[in-house]
Amino acid sequence: MVSRPAKYCPHCGTGLERITFDGHDRSHCPSCERVVWHNPVPCAGVAVVDQSRAEPAVLCVERAVPPGVGEWTIPGGHMEVGEEPEVAAARELEEETGVSVAPDALEILDATALPPRDGKHVVTTYYVADWADATGEPTAGSDAADARFWTPSAFTDSSEQFRPVHEERFRAAFRRFR
């Protein structure tokens, strides 16, 4: 299995061919006769909502690394091998923002397959948490240039750009606590 389209067999190094297998166009190694599966990468993220403000706000990060440098997003990232999605979401939140929340305080917000980027397909499980259940103060951590709370109206009025695939989750998290 590979996360991006392979050109060579990861088992023997032979150049791959395309075949139809199980009704789908697949990569196939003519030497070792294996199908090289191109599967999505599992990711998890969490939107922390602060309801104590006059207008509730969602904790977001500004990306500091590709893809999407300079775009705002819900904190999240790749799951580790053997890691449960809610544990990955809580870990990524702390790594990127310095804010901690217990995995059992998370509620599922959404799960979606994101559009491929450079041949990489991602499936993300999004969670939502109440700021009252979190500890720490937002600071930019790994992969982040900034971390702060945004209200939908403040974001709409700003010149900042939200990562398109995450804006819907940002607004859904906000609505969850209204």
Image: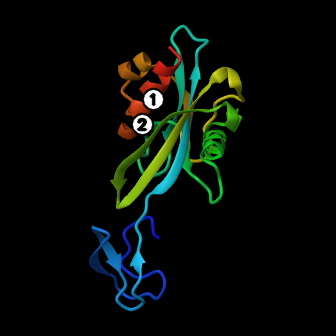
Is 142 placed above or below 167 here?
below
Query: x, y (%) of residue 145?
Result: 54, 40
Q: Secondary structure at mark 1?
A: helix
Disc number at residue 170? 1
* 155 or 167: nearer the viewer: 167
Quadrant of the image occupied by residue 28 = bottom left
* 89 w.r.t. 135: above or below: below
Observer-nearest residue: 161 or 90?
Answer: 90
Q: Which mark is residue 35?
A: none
Q: Amino acid at mark 2?
A: His
Residue 150: image location, x then y, percent: 49, 23
Structural crowding at the residue carrying mark 1, measured as other residues with C-alpha within 10 Å and reported as few (<14), some (14–19) or many (≥20):
many
Residue drawn at (38%, 47%), measured in percent from left and top?
114
Q: Secondary structure at mark 2?
A: helix
Residue plotted at (42% across, 43% down): 112
Q: Which mark is residue 166?
A: 2
Q: Give the percent coordinates (x, y) of residue 109.
A: 50, 32
* Colour setup of the view: rainbow
Note whether 51 is above or below 139 in the view shown.
Answer: above
Q: Nearer the viewer, residue 76 or 111?
A: 111
Q: What residue sits 40% from the left and 47% below the top?
A: 113
Q: Residues within 10 Å of mark 2 (few under 14, many from 20)?
A: some
Q: Amino acid at mark 1?
A: Phe
Seen in the image, is 92 located left or right of residue 170? Answer: right
Along the line of sight, the residue nearer the viewer: 98 or 21? 21
Locate residue 14, reporting x and y percent: 39, 88
- Marks 1 and 2 in Cβ contact (< 8 Å): yes
Relative horizontal placement of residue 84, taking residue 33 as reference (left or right): right
Q: Does 120 appear above or below 61?
A: below
Q: CA distance from mark 1 to mark 2?
A: 6 Å
Q: Residue at x 57, y 23 (%)?
A: 49
